[in-house]
Every structure is written in C-alpha cells, then in structure tokens.
Image (spheres, helix red, strand yellow):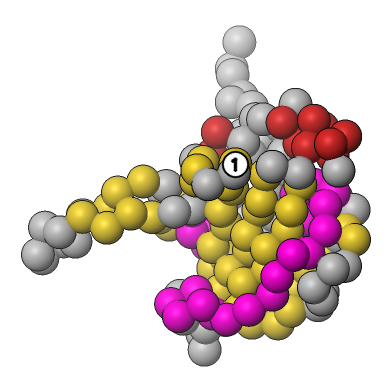
Amino acid sequence: MEEIETRFASNKGKLPWPVDSRTIAEHFGNKVHPVYGTKTPNLGIEIVTDAQSSVEAVHEGYVIDVRPIPGYGDVIFVKHGRFITAYGNLSEVMVRKSEVLSKGDILGLSGDEDSPKGESLFFLIRENDKNLDPENWLQMEPISSNY
C-alpha cells in the first residue's frame, strides 16, 4: 500500500479525469447561497457529464466502502494509502467493497435525470482527514497557442 501511496502523491497535477468531461459545475471550497448568503463547504468538485457516463478510477487502489449518502446518491470510496478518492452521484455502481482496482477500471455510471444532482459526477480527494482541491490533482489540458 505504501508504494501505491507514493505513486499517488507523485501524480499531483497528472491524474486522469474520472469521466470524459472536464466541465466543472461546482468548484472545491466554500460556496455562497445566492439568496441567503450563507456559506457551505463543497468538499470536492461537481463535474458535468452526459447521463450515465462511464466513471473510471483515477489511480490504482482498493474499494473501502460503497454506500448511499444523502444529497450525493451512491458513493464509492477508494483508498490509495493515506489518500482517498470518492465518486458520487452515481446512477449505477459496478464495484464492491474490498475490490482491488487498477487505474482506468470502470467503477460505475454517472448520474442521470433521476440522480440527486442530475447529470454529473461528484469527485473528492482526501489526504488523511483533510479534503484537497481535486483541480490541483487532475491533469489539465494544455492551452493551445497560435504561435
């Protein structure tokens, strides 16, 4: 497990996206309610997807839990040493607890119109007890230039 943890840590900024889409509907951090002005933490990011898109493991690891969470639907938790990734708002789960995963393995399908957050995927990265901004870990597409 220590080797997996080391490889995960060395992939900051290089992890593949868990879905084909790179459109983020909700970013990590505090969000302000548009009417009431109250702040609530967003522990991960919400990625816009087509209905029932394949959701892939961003790194090797093993499934430590699969359970429904109010507001997030079915959520899969994958351990990578001291790191955990979570994939939520799933319309279908295709893995079980204790399953060993390789990078790119299909975990399930993203949300659809019947899912708590619609056609999207909730994605979270945690190190020990601290939530991290997934945008700092995912590979960003290079900006093209006209030079």
- Quarter where residue 91 is shown: bottom right
Q: Label 1: how many residues lie within 10 Å, few (<14), some (14-19) or many (20+)? A: some
Task: Tell me the residue at 48%/53% (across/down).
Answer: 45
Tag 1: amino acid: Glu
Q: Is residue 100 visible?
A: yes
Task: Tell me the residue at 75%/26% (across/down).
Answer: 10
Q: Hey, which residue is sitting farthest left in the picture? A: 36
Q: Position of residue 67 (x, y in %)?
A: 63, 79
Task: Tell me the residue at 21%/55% (across/down).
Answer: 39
Q: Position of residue 77 (x, y in %)?
A: 68, 63
Q: Is residue 68 magenta?
A: yes
Q: Position of residue 85 (x, y in %)?
A: 65, 53
- Quarter where residue 147 is shown: top right
Q: Position of residue 40 (x, y in %)?
A: 27, 58
Residue 120 vs 144, above or below: the answer is below
Q: Hey, which residue is sitting farthest top in the picture? A: 147
Q: Is residue 141 visible?
A: no
Residue 43 vs 2, above or below: the answer is below
The segment highlighted magenta reads 45-73
Residue 36 vs 45, above or below: the answer is below
Provide the residue designation for mark 1. Answer: 127
Q: Is residue 111 magenta?
A: no
Residue 134 vs 51, above or below: the answer is above
Secondary-structure class at tag 1: strand
Residue in front for this viewpoint, 113 or 86: 86
Q: Where the N terminus falls, by quadrant?
A: top right
